[in-house]
């Protein structure tokens, strides 16, 4: 049981809490919720009350009620770590709907805004607290301005966002005046202008499940056979999603203001699962992949992470070669093919070599000097997979890979978007275990 965060919890709060636990054990869930709420009101210092009530509400499907429970000013970083861990525990247990529900509660707590997750029962805007450190870049500001204009032009949001757009433009103008291309902390005047909006979720597109997400036009058995028998473990799937699923996921990525990671070169932006890259349809895709490919994913490898990347119109070739921590990597592209200005590029370059088994994550994911030296020393061959909308690549996650040169149309809705789902751990890979145990030194 969780240790109390404050001493001297009133006896009535403890009695109410124990009564709630008993009612929950007896199957009286509504009564348990009522008692938990009364106990929390009596003593908000009892952290385990909120924790038990969170788990119960989510399992009852009352996610919005659970989000409201976390709209309080007394949260600590430890509270948020506990909530974050719930989604990863559910993912490891292969309960993706539960992981998604906890992820949504975490995002709504960590990245709340004046508009998301909506007004509280009292009619007040959400509590804005505990945002992760935020850094400004010109590319991120330009993206956010373009996205808000896209939403306003399509009447997805209203004129209430006009002052937000103006504030972003003012910060972008100041950043241009300083002639810096580096990330800088969001402080002072910039915090006053856009602190309530920047890297917060202003709009979240509801994107529910569909009857089917994966297209039935590709041969599941053939994909598994090629992946198993191909020495490096690489197979390409066209017409990956149903047309409706592709369109819905595309709208989710264009409309949801979840693109908070801007530490990448050349203006690329990312969004991870608990940043907000989480909706029922994406989780449906992840689950249907496990069911469609039982031999190479199936129950052997749980989903471990899911993310999306958005690109500027140009990315130089061979920018960041890396491998991932998983056993199986599924990468698919959703931007229309006609946005690509180079039919032979814009996709993925996959090298025919594993990350050495002795290398740790920091080395095989980020150490460009060691990676490039390794590839040059081994004179490694590579396969180039050209960009096509609705094309997926299933490959051994240990393989070094990099985005091929990107030259896309400059409009917001033409930005290249790729989605990655990682399954399992590299050390558990049964088909393509890394052969090299070279030292990183």
Image: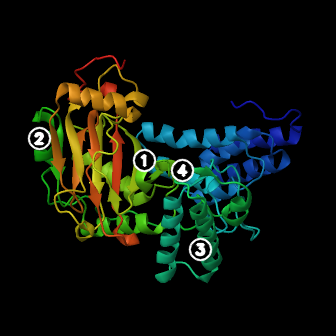
Reading the image, the residue beneath label 2 is 226
Reading the image, the residue beneath label 4 is 182
Discs 4/2, front: 4
Residue at left offset 34%, top offset 69%: 414
Cα distance between the residues tagged 3 and 1: 36 Å
Q: How is the image coloured?
A: rainbow
The image shows residue 338, relative to residue 315, as above or below, that is: below
Residue at left offset 63%, top offset 56%: 67
Q: Which mark is residue 165?
A: 3
Residue 151 on image: x %, y %: 49, 76
Between 303 and 438, the residue placed more toward the observer is: 438
Reading the image, the residue beneath label 1 is 96
Discs 3/1, front: 3
Would you say 52 lies left or right of 373 here?
Answer: right
Q: Secondary structure at mark 3?
A: helix
Graded by Cα atoms within 10 Å as few (under 14), some (14 to 19) or many (20 or more), the crowding at tag 2 reads some
Q: Dots 4 and 2: beta carbons under 8 Å?
A: no
Q: Indicate which disc, 2 or 1, sits on the residue closer to the N terminus.
A: 1
């Amino acid at each position: 049981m969780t240790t109390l965060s404050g001493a001297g919890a009133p006896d009535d709060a403890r009695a109410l809490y124990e009564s709630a636990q008993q009612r929950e054990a007896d199957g009286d869930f509504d009564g348990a919720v009522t008692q938990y709420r009364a106990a929390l009101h009596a003593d908000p210092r009892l952290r385990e009350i909120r924790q038990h009530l969170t788990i119960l509400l989510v399992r009852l499907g009352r996610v919005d009620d659970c989000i409201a429970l976390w709209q309080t000013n007394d949260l600590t970083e430890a509270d948020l770590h506990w909530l974050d861990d719930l989604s990863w525990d559910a993912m490891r247990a292969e309960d993706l709907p539960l992981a998604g529900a906890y992820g949504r509660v975490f995002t709504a707590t960590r990245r709340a805004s004046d508009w998301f997750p909506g007004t509280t029962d009292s009619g007040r805007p959400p509590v804005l607290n505990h945002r992760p450190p935020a850094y400004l870049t010109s590319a991120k500001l330009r993206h956010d301005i373009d996205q808000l204009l896209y939403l306003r032009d399509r009447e997805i949001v209203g004129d209430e966002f006009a002052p937000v757009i103006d504030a972003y433009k003012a910060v972008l103008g100041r950043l241009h005046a300083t002639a810096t291309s580096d990330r800088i902390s969001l402080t002072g005047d910039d915090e006053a202008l856009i602190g309530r909006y920047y890297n917060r979720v202003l709009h979240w597109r509801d994107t529910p499940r569909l009857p089917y997400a994966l297209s039935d036009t590709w041969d599941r058995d053939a994909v598994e056979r090629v992946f198993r028998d191909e020495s490096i473990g690489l197979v390409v799937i066209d017409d990956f999603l149903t047309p409706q699923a592709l369109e819905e996921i595309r709208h989710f990525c264009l409309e949801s203001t979840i693109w908070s990671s801007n530490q990448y070169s050349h203006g690329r932006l990312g969004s991870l699962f608990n940043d907000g890259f989480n909706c029922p349809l994406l989780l449906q895709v992840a689950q249907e992949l496990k069911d469609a490919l039982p031999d190479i994913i199936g129950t052997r490898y749980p989903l471990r992470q899911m993310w999306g990347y958005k690109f500027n119109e140009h990315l130089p070739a061979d920018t960041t070669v890396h491998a991932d921590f998983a056993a199986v990597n599924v990468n698919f592209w959703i931007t229309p093919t006609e946005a690509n200005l180079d039919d032979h590029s814009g996709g993925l370059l996959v090298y025919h070599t594993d990350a050495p088994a002795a290398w740790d994550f920091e080395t095989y994911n980020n150490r460009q000097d060691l990676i490039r030296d390794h590839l040059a020393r081994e004179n490694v061959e590579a396969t180039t997979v050209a960009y096509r909308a609705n094309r997926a690549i299933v490959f051994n996650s240990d393989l070094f890979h990099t985005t091929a040169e990107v030259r896309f149309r400059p409009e917001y809705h033409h930005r290249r978007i790729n989605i990655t789902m990682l399954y399992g751990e590299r050390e558990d890979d049964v088909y393509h275990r890394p052969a090299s145990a070279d030292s990183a030194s």
